[in-house]
Amino acid sequence: MKRHLRLFALYFAQYAKVRLAYKADFFIAFFSSMAATVIGFGFVLVLFTKTPQLQGWSFYEILFLYAFSLVPLGLFNVVSWNLYEFGDMYIIQGRFDRILLRPVNSLFQVIFEKFRIESLQEVVTGLAVIGICTQHLHLGWSLTDYGWFAIMVACGAVIYLSVFLILTSVAFWFEDRIGIVPPVFNMLTFGRYPLTIYSVFIQFMLSWVIPFAFASFYPTTHFLGRQELTGYFYLTPLVAAAFFTLAVAVWNRGVMNYSSTGS
Amino acid sequence: MASPIIEVCDLTKEFRTFKRREGVRGAIQNLFVREQITIRAVDRISFSIEPGEMVGYIGANGAGKSTTIKMLTGILVPTSGSVVAAGFVPYRDRRRYTRHLGAVFGQRTQLWWDIAVIESFKLLKEIYEIPAADYLRRLDFFCEILNLRQYLHTPVRKLSLGERMRCDLAAALLHNPPLPFLDEPTVGLDVVAKDRIREFLKEVNRSQHTTVLLTTHDLSDIEELCHRILIIDRGRILFDGQLAEMKDRLARYNQVKFSLKDRTQVARLPRFAGNGIACERVDDLTYVMRFERSQHSSAEVIRHLVNSLLEVSDIFVEEEPIEDIVKRIYLGGGMG
């Protein structure tokens, strides 16, 4: 564990060095990421000029939900880059060979070889907006609430990671690029609005098949003290643990099935 | 005798792939109906290697060399059969096993593309948990013998192939693995770079008693480095033994090369052809007689040459070049 933390720090420092060597590139990436976040919040603002409430949620409540969904997502985005390119870079180009030749867990290496550093912006912005919302909603958090908040953020990030890890692992069996990741990626936006506005089918999907609701909606209802679907909040760590276990198992099966490329 | 460091038994690897149809129409058909085909890249091979051996593993493109190496290094899981290397089952005990192996894949770098060579080395030091003193000592030794020092601060992507290859070799051996696998370590290199790498490998083998398995298309690598060779052809081991023994068993021809005293002798040559002896021109005055070893002896051919009326200034007896033997094997002449 200690060794892995140390390796993580080294990988991160190394990558940050490379990334910052190309300053212009980094700043453009940073500002475009920032712009996407700002536009997202702008949309919520525009929405609430037309209506004072959305399915019984006030402006600050929706803003809180939106901001909350950003924090674990930002953390996930920081490490997700390699997952997005995995099939191309590692399987088709055969870079995965190198990963398997080293005495470090293969998943650890793949995840931490590249970082989308600019996505830390989403975490910071999200936290800031949550701060503003808690003021306006007079939530008055206790130490326990902060503890739960940290746990929920971590669980959310793990849920995102697990879902995309399972999709990524498909590359071990099907070398042909299949467009399954982008549609699921687009489903991330579903988590930014109250689950109750969707049909029962989508509610079920977002809870038990692609459990994005556990990464934003269920934790938020708890923190806002809302009465809908409150019990689910406590299931979040279980869902995160179950999906992560499944994802790692699928990944490991995939590694055994890896067939490398010609010489 | 010590127990073998690599033990391979009935090792087989099959790949399942889909037949692809050509063209746009074919691509659309491929989406719906795919015909599965199984390719057996490595077919029930067995061999064992003792600690400290340097073994050359050769075969034509697609013969199964890289697939074997990938099973030995744990990258690929065998379809059937067994491998035990340094006491581990490579694919199963991967993380513990990788500390004992080093690997160079000539076609592909193991280093991080965007960062300076020395930074890659430092990361490897942490990954393999190499003690600082050992790390510095080895780094120094590698820089010296592979002449790396001036590239240490260059990003890997800016190195030439030869420079990168030397860095790759150093990277693969930094943790002093008892079992380096080298897949075409000299591919695309110039004579000087090749020589440096060979000297380096000899030195490491001598001083560290490492066991080296290397694949190559350059047979002079084998002649320089390896006492033993394994030849694989269409997934099967065709020959396993000493290099000298291979020449003895598989060489079909010998040749006698001779130089004529002057041009006037050329007209007298034709009588030499025939009777299982082929006479070929090398240059104006140099000719070579090639004959089957089973039919003629070198002594007999030389006697024939000396007794003739040709005035000859020099005679050399040569074995069939190893390239020719191997070429014949690749072309399917096999063990003849």
Image: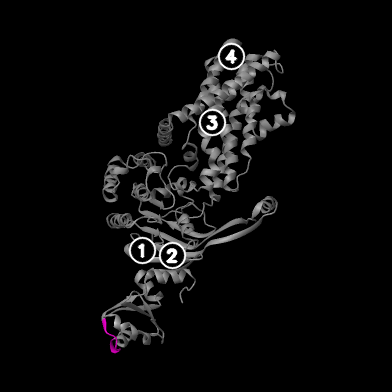
Q: Please tell me whether residue B29 belongs to the stretch shown in magenta.
A: no
Residue B207 place in picture, x, y as percent: 27, 55
- Report in which chain the residue with disc 4 lies: A
Q: Which residues are magenta?
A: B306-312
Q: Is residue A136 visible?
A: yes
Q: Is residue B297 visible?
A: no
Q: Is residue A61 shown above or below A79? A: above
- Report in which chain the residue with disc 1 lies: B
Which numbered disc flags the more N-terminal residue, 2 or 1? Answer: 2
Which of the two marks, 4 or 3, is nearer to us in this view? 3
Q: Tell me the kind of residue under disc 2.
A: Phe
The CA span between labels 2 and 4 is 70 Å
What residue is shown with label 3? Answer: A77
Q: Tell me the kind of residue under disc 1.
A: Ile
What residue is shown with label 1? Answer: B222
What residue is shown with label 2? Answer: B47
Mark 4, other Cα within 10 Å: few <14 / some 14–19 / many ≥20: many
Asked whether the beta carbons under mark 2 and mark 4 sit within 8 Å of each other, the answer is no
Q: Tell me the kind of residue under disc 4.
A: Cys
Question: Can you name the residue that lies furthest to the front here?
Answer: B264
Q: Secondary structure at mark 2?
A: strand
Q: Tell me the kind of residue under disc 3.
A: Asn
